[in-house]
Image (cartoon, helix red, strand yellow):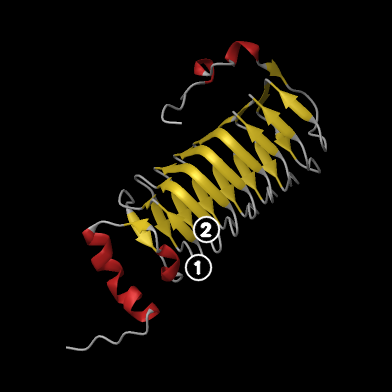
Amino acid sequence: MADVPEQLADLPYADLLQPHSGALHRDARYDTVHFDGGEYTGQASGASFLECAFTGVELAGTALRTSRWNEVWIQGGRLVGTELVDSEWQDTALLGSVLAGVAWYGAQLRRTVLRGCKLESVNLRGAVLRDVVFEDCLLRDVDFAGARLTDVSVPGSTLDGVRFGGARMERVDLRGAARLGLPDGHQGLSGAILNTGQLLELAPQFAHALGITVKD
């Protein structure tokens, strides 16, 4: 998912979108729907979204467990206290959005791009991420403990208080990060790609994790 449309009109399904009105519903299927503005709360677990667009929408405490998101485009969204446990995301994009206090654990994300987003206190424990890009994002207190990450990259992103304890990684490219603030869980970085400067910066924490005492 290299090319992500920046404008609604650039979506391949833009001409098919129909405006949505009303609430979200449990187990509902939304196909080529445009959710524009407004706040959605309540119970919508099991809902599925196919070729949908969200612009300026707030999902506040919305229960979307086991929901499915396929070819969905979200711009300027606010996900606050949203439950996305065991949800599935494929070929999706989140642009300029805020995710705070989101329960995203056990989810599966594939070919997903987050660009210019702010993630704070997001729980991705046990999630499976494949071909995921965090581009120019802020990840603060994001928990990837026990997650499986494959072909994940973080170009231009700041990681602050991000935890990878017990994670399993393959080709996770951290070289483009603006900052790597990793308080613990360094053994979970096995399989990650770092540059020399990042390795030197993290060396004291690696030594501590391995029980190595460094004395001159």
Q: Could you tell me the amino acid type at mark 1?
A: Gly
Most foreground residue, 7 or 155: 155
For mark 1, give the secondary structure.
loop
Residue furthest top as drawn: 15
Residue furthest left as drawn: 216
Whichever of callouts 1 and 2 sits on the residue coming sooner in the sequence is: 2
| 57 in relation to 86, above or below | above
The numbered dot on residue 34 is none
Residue appearing at x 58%, y 35% in the figure: 90
Most foreground residue, 99 or 194: 194
One can see residue 206 in this view: yes
The Cα–Cα distance between marks 1 and 2, rounded to whole angstroms, is 12 Å
| 203 in relation to 111, above or below | below
Most foreground residue, 14 or 3: 3
Q: Estimate the x, y position of residue 7 in percent, counting from the top left.
A: 49, 21
Q: Residues within 10 Å of mark 2 (few under 14, many from 20)?
A: many
For mark 2, give the secondary structure.
loop
Please name the residue that numbered disc 2 is placed on: 142
Q: Residues within 10 Å of mark 1 (few under 14, many from 20)?
A: some
The numbered dot on residue 165 is 1
